[in-house]
Image (cartoon, rainbow, N blue to C red):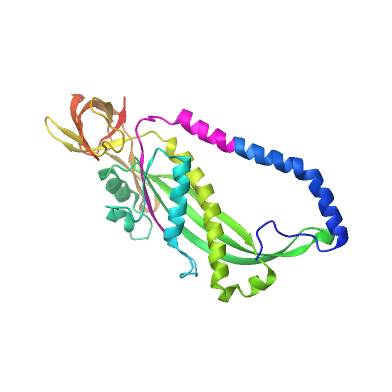
Amino acid sequence: MKNRDSRAPKNSFGVICFFLMLSIITPFISGCSFFSSINTSSKRMIRDIRSPHKDIKKKVGITFFENKTSFLKQVDEQRFVNDLVENMKKSCPDEILVKPGDINYPEFLVKLPKNDSGWINTLKLANASRQLGFNAILTGAITDIIKKQEERGFWLFKDTYHYFETHISVEVYDTLTGAKLLDERFSHEMEVDEIDFEGSDTSANLMTSIIKEAYSDIASDMGEHVCNEIVLQPWQGYITFVDADKIIITSGKTTGIKSGNVFEVYDSSEIFNGSAGHQFFIPGLKIGEIKITEVLTDSAEAVKISGQNIRVGSFIRPK
């Protein structure tokens, strides 16, 4: 079994050329590595600078990733989710990540609401998420593990390349509207020897190794992309109870809410009917302001400062 970049020339002439080429491109390889480090640091700096409402944490619900491959026994969906969460903790450490296996993991995340055609019912998903103070929902699927071979290289260096290609898709839904913040597919290649390639159908160890490497590589890239989308979104909370003298929101101490915080309240009652039966919330105009008076672990009480039409389902943002 070989890693992706482990191939070497097979004759003496090729070996000489290989080392000559290596001496020429080594500085460029180092430069690329340096650039990659700068690029990663820059992304983190941009997130820190541009993240709105940094004192308040966003709550992200993460579901199981569906296994759509034919490798039902070797593919461990929970392992990929764990890898992804660990990478997200590095890229966006200040956000609250709720994953399968956590205590009091929400039932609606175990089985996402779907419409008759099998698509996720975005309106029901957003409603259920708002009740528990989520800002975004992350879901996805391990879509395929494909066995491939092809001719690569040129002239004397042409060779048959045997490899496995793993594809994992991810979707991130915004609970304010129900729309997608991200819908992307990530891929990973792992090269193997011809002998391993031919016997892969019966080699459980090989498939385990392929899946482990693919998980690690994709989880790192995916975690970075997901955090870029989530962190730069403005935080919003939701009102779940309104009485004459009391208002309750679905965020509390865990999120970073403090007594005395003032929030602007916005209408969220309009619904847009999209194609294929999809429905989405339309963020509306500002309708008032509230002030937090008491903070619990995952909720808070507030009183109205101004406004006449504050109702259940309205969303709030820091003033």
Q: Where residue 65 sits: x, y (%)? A: 42, 58
Of residue 178 and residue 201, the one placed in the foreground of this image is: 201
The N terminus lies in quadrant = bottom right
Figure check: 236 above or below 163 = above
In percent of width and height, residue 50 lies at: 46, 29
Residue 36, percent from left and from top = 62, 40
Q: Residue at x 27, y 45 (%)?
A: 132
Left-right relation of 127 to 85: left
| Left or right, 92 with reference to 150 | left
User: Which residue of the protein is positioned furthest toward the right in this rendering?
Assistant: 13
User: Which quarter of the figure is the C terminus placed in?
Assistant: top left
Between 116 and 66, the one lying in front of the other is: 66
Q: Quadrant of residue 252?
A: top left
Which residues are drawn in magenta?
Answer: 39-65
Q: Is residue 112 visible?
A: no
Which residue reaches farthest left?
244
Residue 223 in the image, given as x and y percentages of width and height: 48, 46
Q: Which residue is drawn at 85% across and 53% down?
A: 17
Residue 88: name its quadrant.
top left
Query: Is residue 35 left or right of 175 when viewed as pictured?
Result: right
Viewer-proximal residue, 157 or 112?
157
Label count reads 0
Q: Is residue 61 magenta?
A: yes
Residue 284 lies left or right of residue 233; in this view the side is left
Q: Is residue 138 visible?
A: yes
Residue at coordinates 55% horizontally, 58% vertically from top-left? 214
Residue 152 sits inside the magenta stretch: no
